[in-house]
Image (spheres, rainbow, N blue to C red):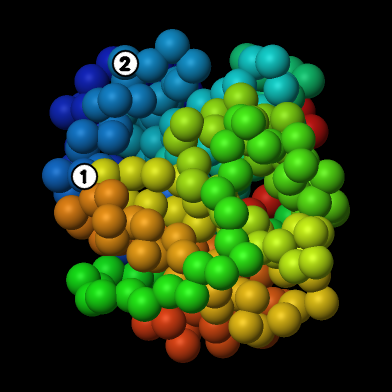
Amino acid sequence: MIIIRKVKNFEEVKDYVFKMSFNDSTASYPRHDNKADLEKRFKKYLGEDETEVVAAYDGDTLCGVCSFFWIEEDLYCQSILMLASGEYELVMDEFFKYIEKVKKGYELFVGFPTTNLEALEYLSRHYKCSEHSVVTDYKKDTNIECDCSNIIEITKDNFSEYKDFHDKYALASEMYWKADNLVNSLDYFYVYAYKEAGQIIGSIFARKGDVFQEIVGLFVDDKVPAIYEKLLKKFMSRVKTDVSVIDILYFIDESEKIELENALNQGFRIKEYYKMFRTNL
């Protein structure tokens, strides 16, 4: 019988979390570059009010660890760790039952690298795959020349001009960061738009960060390669100015061939592949 217990300190699950998280066949998303980073973030999760960490036990044997956060006003819930072993399906069933019990009415999102075949097989039987992306990253410290003509920075002062263009893409892809959510968190993002003949026809928005940055969306009308290139270079040049460590993460939908080609041309490398699943609790 699988029992779910709340985790009170990292030490009780430390060895298990390290072993499972750094094995491509058992890992979940988000990934971590090293053990120190994972431990720091895990301990942070334990202290946050809108995050919960639980473990699964089969008798005295630890067979799973799950952490998730939620945004109450949006009824949004997302896993930030979902590791399971032993009776895999039973462990996963209990995790989902537990999350549903404490977050009934929320929409839950869970993500895994495609190398975790057991997770993908389980999730594909029960839930809808809402994203299949190529995960790329960029860690070079090189000068980036950028033609910034026609590019403007989006701030709260001019966000109303940008809002409709953003939602044309954000709502279609059902992403959390639609315009109303983005504007309320604008201090944590870089947002740039490309204008032509007075109209916005492209944009990029990305999370700021001293340790790593993440491109969340790059939208271009008619998929013009030159506009992809200009917006990406503008963001990259800004990051190089703002932070000492460049570590950019960029999820690109597998169907967006022009967007992926542009990223690779700018020095991004393919890291792995990722799937996200969603369900209403």
How far apart are labels 2 and 1 at the CA level?
A: 16 Å
Tell me, for residue 204, which label it has, or none: none
Q: Position of residue 162 (x, y in %)?
A: 74, 45
Q: Which residue is mark 2?
A: 47
Front residue of this view, candidates 170 and 92: 170
- Mark 1 Cα-neighbour bin, 10 Å: few <14, some 14–19, many ≥20: few
243 versus 221 height, above or below: above
Q: Residue at x 29, y 25 (%)?
A: 44
The amino acid type, in three-letter code, at marker 2 is: Gly
Q: Which mark is residue 37?
A: 1
Could you tell me residue 47's position as x and y percent? 31, 15
Q: Are marks 2 and 1 in contact (CB under 8 Å)?
A: no
Q: Earlier in the sequence, mark 2 or mark 1?
A: 1
Q: Which picture quadrant has residue 269?
A: bottom left
Q: Residues within 10 Å of mark 2 (few under 14, many from 20)?
A: few
From the top left corner, tell me how far across and down residue 220 is, in percent: 72, 68
Of 267 and 5, the residue lying toward us = 267
Picture residue at 80% right of the left edge, 59% below the top: 199
Q: Position of residue 263 (x, y in %)?
A: 50, 78
Q: Is residue 230 shown left or right of residue 242? A: right
Q: In the picture shown, does residue 249 fall above or below 68?
A: below
Mark 1 residue type = Asp
The residue closer to the viewer here, 113 or 118, is: 113
Q: Secondary structure at mark 1?
A: helix
SS at mark 2 in the image:
loop
